[in-house]
Amino acid sequence: MPKRGYHHGNLAQALINAALRLIEEKGPTGFTLSEAAKAADVTPAAVYRHFQGRDEIIAECARQGYEIFADQMERAYQSGQPSALASFEATGRAYLSFARQHPGHYVAMFESGVNVQHHAGLHAVAARANSVLERAAADLSQHIPAAQRPPAQMFSAHIWAMSHGVVELFARNSPGTNVPYPPEDLLEAGIGIYLRGLGLLAPDR
């Protein structure tokens, strides 16, 4: 009797979904192709009809994650319009929301070691996600005199790094890093300090 995987009409996506579950449970290097095939209820040989190996499956998990991430970032940006500040702050919150809602994708994107430069489709969609935050940073930094204005790419990279740090340390139940503040509050406070340093927020904001 054929395996169930051959009947659902999308074997490749079934393997991706199985890999995402395994990534959540075991990490990106904690499972084998055979385990992914078993979780998708197909034969190991069926995997190679769509993917050359585990790294290619993880890269596709990351690509799909970046698609979701970029869409969430774009919605967050638009939700704050026409306020440049509201849009900028919303993109930071969207980072936390994505990490919580899509942990398997998040790990594939940021903790698997996948190189976005080596996968054309992955590079393109990652750049789209990055561009939303850069746009938000560029909008907000227009209030800074040109001679003192940081490049939007640097500005957005600082906030990306801050958001990533809050996620890694405080939003994913990392042991030994409990603090009496929600991750959202930590991120908002950190962004506020950064923006005040650039003169984009009033001292009492």
Image (cartoon, rainbow, N blue to C red):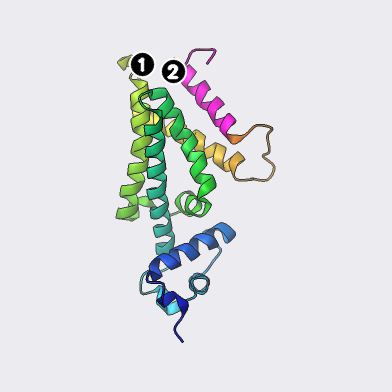
Tell me where residue 146 appears, x and y as whole percent. Answer: 30, 16
**Mark 1 → mark 2, Cα distance in angstroms:** 8 Å
Whether the magenta-drawn stretch holds residue 4 is answered as no
Q: Residue at x 51, y 22 (%)?
A: 192
Provide the major secondary structure of the magenta segment: helix
Tell me where residue 85 appears, x and y as whole percent. Answer: 42, 23
Answer yes or no: is residue 150 visible: no
Badge 1 vs badge 2, beta-carbon distance below 8 Å: yes
**Residue at the disc numbered 1:** 144
Q: Residue at x 33, y 14 (%)?
A: 145
Q: Secondary structure at mark 1?
A: loop
Q: Secondary structure at mark 2?
A: loop
**Residue 36 against residue 1 in the figure, above or below:** above
Q: Residue at x 55, y 40 (%)?
A: 167
Residue placed most toward the observer, 88 or 157: 88
The part of the chain drawn in magenta is: 184-205
**Residue 127 against residue 84 in the figure, above or below:** below
**Residue at the disc numbered 2:** 198
* Residue type at the position of mark 2: Leu
Q: Residue furthest bottom?
A: 1
**Residue 79 against residue 203 in the figure, above or below:** below
Tell me where residue 176 appears, x and y as whole percent. Answer: 69, 42
Quadrant of the rendered image containing residue 31: bottom right
* Residue type at the position of mark 1: Ile
Q: Earlier in the sequence, mark 1 or mark 2?
A: 1
Number of other residues with Cα within 10 Å of mark 2, as a class: few under 14, some 14 to 19, many 20 or more: some
